[in-house]
C-alpha cells in the first residue's frame, strides 16, 4: 500500500470492494450496513484533541462536546487552547481527566517534546510509543488517531469494545474476542483493516438499532 492514505469516499469504496470480494463475513456485513462513512479527521493537535475528547463516550455525546469545545477555542490550536480557563473547558463537557490530558498534549507540543507533524509518516509502533508516553493516552487513542487522523488504510483498533462486539456478531463467535484474537482475526482483512473497522462500526450501529427495535 506504500504511503497511500484514505482521504475520500473513493478510497472507502475501493477498500470495501476488496474486502467483500475476499471475505464472506465482510460481504454479509456490507450487505446489512452498506458503505461506511469516511470519518476523516485532521491530523495534528486538533485531530488528537477530538479523539481524546471522545474517549469512552457515545458518538453523539462526543460530537456534542467537541462542538462546544471547538466553539470556545478559536482557532483550534495549542496557544488558544492553553489560554482558555479550565472552567470553560469543564462547561464544554470535558472531565477533569481529559482536561489534564489535553493540557499535557498541548504543553508537550508547545515545548517541542511532541512533534505530531513528524509522526505523520512514522511507523505505527513509533506513533504508539510517542503518544502513549503521555499521561491519559492509551493504545485506543493512538489507534483511532492513526486510523481517522492519519488515514492509514491498514490501521486497526483491537481494543475498541464496539469493534469487538461487532466482530463477535459478524463471525458468530460465542464470546467477545480479546486483543490477541482481534489481531489474529483482522489479518484476513489486510491491507484494508481500517475500512474493515469502518464497516464493522457501521454494522454494529445497525445491529444495535435492530435489537432495540428502532426503525432502520
Image (tube, rainbow, N blue to C red):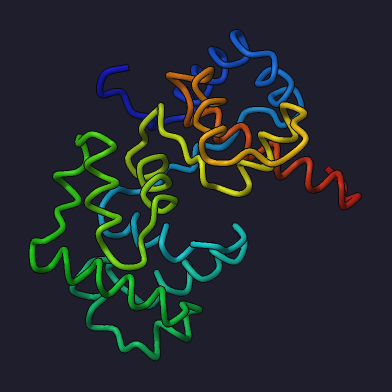
Q: Nearer the viewer, residue 12 or 156?
A: 156
At x 14% / y 53%, what residue is drawn? 115
Place of residue 110 in the rendered image (x, y in percent of width and height, measured from the top left): 12, 68
Residue 199, above or below 101: above
Residue 125 position within the rendered picture, expressed as x and y whole percent measured from the top left: 27, 38
Among all residues in the image, which is located at the extreme left? 112
**165 is higher (above) or lower (below) than 66:** above
Q: Nearer the viewer, residue 174 or 27?
A: 174
Q: Is residue 169 left or right of residue 213?
A: left
What is the residue that sits farthest to the right in this orientation? 213
Quadrant, the N terminus: top left
* Above-or-below relation of 87 to 37: below
Q: Is residue 213 left or right of residue 82?
A: right
Q: Residue at x 25, y 24 (%)?
A: 3
Q: Is residue 140 left or right of residue 48?
A: right
At 60% from the left and 66% from the top, the residue drawn is: 61
Determine which quarter of the picture holds residue 121: top left
Residue 138 location (% of width, % of height)? 38, 56
Q: Quadrant of residue 181?
A: top right
Amino acid at each position: 500500500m506504500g504511503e497511500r492514505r484514505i482521504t475520500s469516499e473513493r478510497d472507502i469504496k475501493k477498500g470495501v470492494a476488496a474486502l467483500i470480494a475476499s471475505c464472506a463475513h465482510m460481504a454479509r456485513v456490507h450487505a446489512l450496513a452498506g458503505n461506511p462513512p469516511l470519518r476523516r479527521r485532521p491530523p495534528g493537535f486538533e485531530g488528537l484533541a477530538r479523539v481524546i475528547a471522545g474517549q469512552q463516550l457515545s458518538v453523539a455525546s462526543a460530537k456534542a462536546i467537541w462542538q462546544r469545545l471547538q466553539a470556545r477555542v478559536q482557532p483550534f490550536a495549542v496557544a488558544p487552547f492553553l489560554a482558555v480557563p479550565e472552567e470553560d473547558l469543564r462547561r464544554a463537557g470535558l472531565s477533569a481527566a481529559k482536561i489534564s490530558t489535553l493540557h499535557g498534549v498541548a504543553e508537550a507540543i508547545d515545548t517541542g517534546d511532541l512533534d505530531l507533524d513528524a509522526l505523520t509518516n512514522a511507523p505505527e509502533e513509533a506513533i504508539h510509543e510517542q503518544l502513549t508516553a503521555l499521561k491519559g493516552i492509551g493504545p485506543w487513542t493512538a489507534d483511532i488517531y492513526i486510523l481517522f487522523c492519519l488515514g492509514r488504510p491498514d490501521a486497526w483498533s483491537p481494543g475498541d469494545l464496539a469493534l469487538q462486539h461487532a466482530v463477535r456478531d459478524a463471525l458468530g463467535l460465542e464470546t467477545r474476542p480479546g486483543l490477541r484474537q482481534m489481531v489474529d482475526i483482522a489479518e484476513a482483512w489486510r491491507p484494508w483493516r481500517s475500512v474493515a473497522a469502518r464497516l464493522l462500526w457501521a454494522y454494529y450501529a445497525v445491529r444495535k438499532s435492530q435489537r432495540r427495535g428502532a426503525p432502520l
